[in-house]
């Protein structure tokens, strides 16, 4: 078409390519947003699950409760031989016991007795494949061994500790019980604190005595009582002359052998005087190596006898006398005939170790011991106090008399 002689160009319409790009971009943006939202939802769900698990664990940890109760000890020669304690559950679910540590050392072999079910057994922390399970509201008594082997209600067990790791009576005992829920239940048992006071009565007069007083000893924590005060005095202040045999007798004896060697065994008693200025006394006599070698009547033409054994056990008394029970075994050699024997367990060279054992509630009876003074000779005084858990506190001091 022409207008005014000019040809008008035809207009060509084309679809724009920008519309398709916008649609693809929008779709990709939607995919990215949906993916991000999905990942965020998965992360939030996982985080919520983790938080819920941690909250559940924390909740269960806070609810789990195990009490360590009833420490019972056995002491021989100043060391523990066995002791036991009770684990009491206060939790509504079972508690798995992973480890038990005492004073930071693992408990290895031990026996257990379930008070609730009246069942018992043994457990070894190294070889046992199953943990010790404490059921809801049950009580399990754990028995330990501090010597080579021990007999327990669950059966024989070996030593519960590695060498050098066993606790001692004159130290604290700290229990750590670890569970599956990563709880550590702790209980500490403290020994008593001994306080020994030395004073003198009538130091410049006749028959002066020293008074040992441990009545101010105390138990930290205040939840136990001191039940035993044990005094031990050593040194020059106490001689053997004060202890003299006043009578003795052989209550039974028997002769074995066919000659020329015979052995005579028997039992007897000997009574020793105890100084009247001893307020309390309890102790075992200490005899010479061969207390009866020269105190026999030999009718068999034998050579000098050999004292194979001589043991004695003391009694107790407050002044006056004390009777000692003894057993003996004497061997005769090169005899021409069967010997007979009559001897005296003479007091010469016999020492009665004086110490005090006073039982009762704390401070109910003043735990005091009066001892004789030997001039200016110093001596050593040891006071051991024991509480109702069997733990002991010991203090030693040196003292020189005033007179």
Image: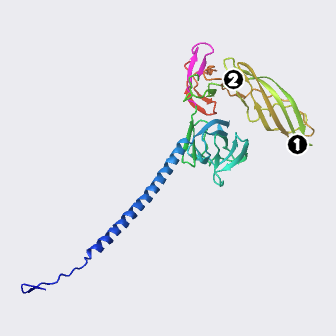
Label 1 crowd (10 A; few <14 / some 14-19 / many >=20): some
The answer to whether 88 appears left or right of 39 in the picture is right
Q: Where is residue 238 in the image (x, y as percent from the top left)?
A: 64, 25
Label 1: element kind: loop
Residue beneath label 1, please?
A: 261
The answer to whether 46 appears left or right of 25 in the picture is right
The residue nearer to you, when weighing 160 against 71, is: 71
Question: Which dot marks residue 167?
Answer: none
Q: Where is residue 338 in the image (x, y as percent from the top left)?
A: 92, 38
Instruction: Write down the quadrant of residue 348 in the picture.
Output: top right
Q: Real-space Cα distance between discs 1 and 2?
A: 41 Å
State yes or no: residue 179 in magenta: no
The residue nearer to you, when weighing 366 against 106, is: 106
The residue nearer to you, when weighing 314 against 95, is: 95
Hey, which residue is sitting farthest left in the picture? 4
Question: Which dot marks residue 281?
Answer: 2
Q: Where is residue 81 in the image (x, y as percent from the top left)?
A: 68, 40
| Region of the chain picked out in magenta, as a range | 192-213
Label 2: element kind: strand
Q: Do the residues labelled 1 and 2 touch (CB within 8 Å)?
A: no
| Residue 29 visible in image | yes
């Amino acid at each position: 078409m022409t207008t005014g002689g000019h040809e008008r160009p035809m207009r060509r319409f084309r679809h724009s390519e920008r519309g398709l790009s916008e649609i693809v971009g929008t779709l990709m943006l939607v995919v990215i947003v949906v993916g991000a939202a999905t990942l965020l939802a998965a992360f939030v769900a996982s985080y919520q699950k983790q938080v819920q698990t941690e909250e559940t664990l924390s909740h269960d940890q806070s609810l789990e409760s195990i009490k360590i109760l009833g420490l019972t000890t056995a002491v021989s020669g100043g060391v523990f031989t066995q002791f036991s304690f009770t684990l009491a559950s206060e939790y509504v679910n079972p508690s798995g016991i992973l480890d038990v540590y005492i004073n930071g050392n693992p408990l290895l072999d031990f026996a257990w007795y379930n008070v609730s079910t009246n069942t018992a057994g043994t457990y070894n922390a190294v070889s046992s494949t199953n943990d010790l399970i404490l059921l809801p509201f049950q009580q399990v008594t754990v028995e330990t061994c501090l010597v080579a082997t021990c007999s327990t209600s669950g059966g024989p067990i070996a030593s519960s500790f590695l060498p050098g790791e066993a606790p001692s009576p004159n130290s604290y005992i700290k229990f750590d019980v670890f569970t599956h829920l990563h709880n550590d239940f702790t209980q500490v048992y403290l020994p008593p604190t001994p306080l020994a006071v030395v004073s003198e009565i009538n130091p410049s007069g006749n028959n002066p005595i020293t008074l040992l007083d441990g009545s101010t000893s105390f138990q930290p924590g205040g939840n136990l009582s001191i039940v035993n005060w044990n005094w031990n005095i050593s040194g020059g202040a106490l001689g053997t002359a004060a202890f003299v045999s006043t009578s003795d007798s052989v209550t039974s004896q028997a002769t074995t052998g066919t000659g020329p060697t015979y052995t005579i065994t028997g039992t007897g008693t000997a009574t020793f005087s105890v100084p009247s200025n001893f307020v309390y006394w309890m102790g075992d006599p200490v005899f010479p190596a061969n207390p009866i070698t020269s105190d026999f009547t030999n009718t068999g033409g034998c050579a000098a006898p050999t004292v194979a054994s001589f043991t004695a056990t003391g009694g107790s008394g407050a002044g006056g006398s004390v009777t000692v029970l003894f057993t003996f075994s004497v061997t005769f050699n090169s005899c021409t005939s069967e010997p007979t024997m009559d001897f005296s367990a003479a007091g010469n060279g016999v020492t009665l170790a004086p110490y005090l054992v006073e039982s009762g509630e704390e401070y109910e009876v003043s735990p005091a011991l009066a001892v004789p003074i030997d001039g200016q000779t110093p001596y050593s005084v040891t006071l051991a106090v024991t509480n109702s858990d069997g733990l002991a506190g010991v203090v030693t001091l040196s003292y020189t008399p005033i007179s």
